Image (cartoon, rainbow, N blue to C red):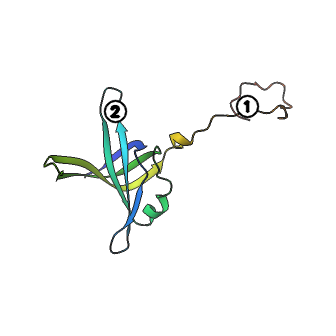
Amino acid sequence: MNSIFLAGSLGRDAELRHLPNGDAVLNFSVADSAGRDKPTIWWNCQLFGKRAEALAQYLTKGQAVAVSGSVSEREWTDKDGNTKKSMNVRVNEVALQGKREEAKTVPTAKSASTPRSNFPDMDDDIPFN
């Protein structure tokens, strides 16, 4: 059985295309970073069908994802005659993991008109209201 589970961030916006028969295919790349001193592995991912069309707008650069699927290795020769290899994943499942890094916002200070709690025994350090 050939399967992989990986988690990482998208390196670029996903590209939605259609095959000659009309089926949708969504291509995106996921960066799998093993640590500061280790090289990042880039996985080329393909998702097919209606889910590809549905997820295209959400798979944007910087989005953290978890992906499961099957792996294949592709080898080709570049324009300079060098042999290149890439790791490809035919995606079975993809899950969005939180918000895009770019979309994070800085919390704003609460206004003075925010009503105070009527429970004096509650801690002011509660991280939610």
* Amino acid marked by disc 1: Ala
Name the quarter where the C terminus is drawn: top right
Residue 90 quadrant: bottom left
Badge 1: residue crowd in 10 Å (few <14, some 14–19, many ≥20): few
Q: Amino acid at mark 2?
A: Ala
> Mark 2 sits on what residue?
34
Secondary structure of the residue carrying numbered label 1: loop
Q: Position of residue 10 (x, y in %)?
A: 42, 46
The quadrant where residue 6 appears: top left
Q: Earlier in the sequence, mark 1 or mark 2?
A: 2
Task: Indicate whether 27 appears above or below 63.
Answer: below
Question: What is the secondary structure assignment of the residue under circle 2?
Answer: loop
Q: Is residue 107 above or below residue 69?
A: above
On screen, residue 57 versus residue 81, left or right, reads right
Q: Residue 41, position in %: x, y?
A: 30, 40
Please report the residue visible at 24 percent of the width from the left and 48 percent of the height from the top. Answer: 86
Residue 2 position within the rendered picture, expressed as x and y whole percent measured from the top left: 26, 51
Most distant residue in the bottom direction: 21
Residue at image coords 73%, 31%: 109
Residue that carries the numbered disc 1 in the rendered image: 109
Residue 61 drawn above or below residue 126: below
User: Is mark 1 in CB contact (under 8 Å) with mark 2?
Assistant: no
Residue drawn at point x = 56 percent, y = 42 percent: 103
Q: Nearer the viewer, mark 1 or mark 2?
A: 1
Percent across and percent down for residue 68 are 37, 50
